[in-house]
């Protein structure tokens, strides 16, 4: 009973930490770290009145339904709760962190928590901190036997019907999201009249955030065993379980592959 309660607490804590990483370190600076919420950040630039978390719902709910209809995945209660709670936490934190509706729509970092967390001049730092926080939050969710859904479902569909290896499909999907962000945010398609529109170099910070997040996520899941290893693929939902595929390369002569099964 204690393990069940602690796992549910871990899901809510992890989702909240994950949401905080986006709200305070990623969203205000238009970084696009791939995935569902990266795409949501891009769409928020096109439709500022709709919050990033709301776009998250627009992606997550259909993807969860598609995973059942197309892939036949039986989603556990933990995964459904995590996928639905994360966008909610993101929207609530955003509402509490900005003083006005205008600042909320603009995600103005100068007004975030009264300007006390403005890191506009330290994009490298905020991308690394945000990635670490997101990796920790996502790792806690995974260790609590859940996932937050997302573009891994798209990757599984590509793997099933296009015969693209899962890890390559994830890179393809994230690459498309980052490229979309480069067009909309970097080149100003979303706000062509905005003189303060960030430049294309934000895509490099986004790639850094993706890399750091993957390493932190791997460390939280695997502990010190991941110190000399590299995460190459992601979490995917399969019938009756969530399977984490970690292909690791070690400096020792033999390479090994670890498959961890987490029953739902």
Image (cartoon, rainbow, N blue to C red):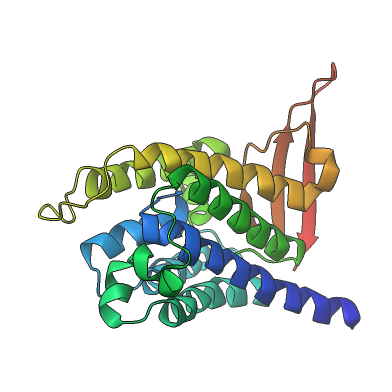
Q: Residue at the spot x=56%, y=38% of the render? A: 167
Q: Nearer the viewer, residue 118 or 242?
A: 118
Can you give x and y, in whole percent of width and height, for residue 36 in the image?
44, 58
Q: Classify 167 as above or below 34.
A: above
Q: Can residue 74 be seen here?
A: no
Q: Is residue 135 left or right of residue 5?
A: left
Q: Residue at the spot x=62%, y=67% of the render? A: 17
Q: Can residue 262 be seen here?
A: yes
Can you give x and y, in whole percent of width and height, for residue 201 in the image?
33, 37
Can you give x and y, in whole percent of width and height, for residue 109 in the image?
37, 63
Q: Classify 264 as above or below 41.
A: below
Q: Is residue 52 left or right of residue 85?
A: left
Q: Nearer the viewer, residue 164 or 199?
A: 199
Judged from this view, the residue extending furthest toward the right is 2
Q: Nearer the viewer, residue 170 or 239?
A: 170
Q: Residue at the spot x=50%, y=68% of the render? A: 64
Can you give x and y, in whole percent of width and height, for residue 155 in the image?
49, 47
In what quadrant of the picture does the C terminus appear? bottom right
Q: Classify 183 as above or below 133.
A: above
Q: Residue at the spot x=16%, y=50% of the render? A: 189
In what quadrant of the picture does the N terminus appear? bottom right
Q: Nearer the viewer, residue 214 or 133?
A: 133
């Amino acid at each position: 009973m204690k393990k069940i309660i602690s796992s549910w607490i871990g899901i809510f804590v992890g989702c909240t930490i994950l949401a905080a990483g986006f709200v305070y370190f990623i969203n205000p600076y238009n970084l696009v770290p791939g995935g569902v919420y990266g795409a949501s950040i891009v769409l928020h630039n096109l439709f500022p009145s709709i919050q990033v978390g709301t776009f998250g719902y627009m992606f997550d709910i259909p993807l969860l339904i598609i995973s059942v209809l197309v892939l036949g995945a039986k989603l556990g209660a933990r995964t459904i709760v995590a996928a639905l709670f994360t966008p909610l936490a993101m929207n609530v934190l955003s509402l509490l962190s900005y003083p006005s509706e205008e600042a909320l729509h603009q995600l103005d970092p100068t007004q975030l928590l009264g300007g006390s967390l403005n890191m506009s001049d330290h994009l490298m730092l905020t991308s690394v901190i945000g990635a670490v926080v997101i990796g920790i939050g996502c790792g806690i969710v995974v260790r609590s036997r859940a996932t937050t859904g997302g573009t891994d479902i798209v990757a599984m569909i590509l793997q099933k019907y296009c015969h693209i290896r899962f890890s390559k499909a994830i890179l393809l999907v994230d690459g498309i999201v980052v490229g979309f962000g480069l067009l909309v945010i970097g080149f100003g398609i979303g706000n062509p009249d905005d003189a303060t529109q960030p430049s294309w170099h934000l895509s490099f910070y986004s790639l850094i955030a993706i890399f750091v997040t993957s390493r932190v996520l791997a460390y939280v899941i695997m502990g010190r065993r991941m110190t000399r290893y590299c995460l190459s693929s992601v979490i995917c939902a399969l019938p009756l379980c969530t399977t984490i595929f970690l292909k690791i390369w070690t400096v020792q002569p033999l390479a090994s592959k670890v498959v961890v099964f987490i029953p739902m």
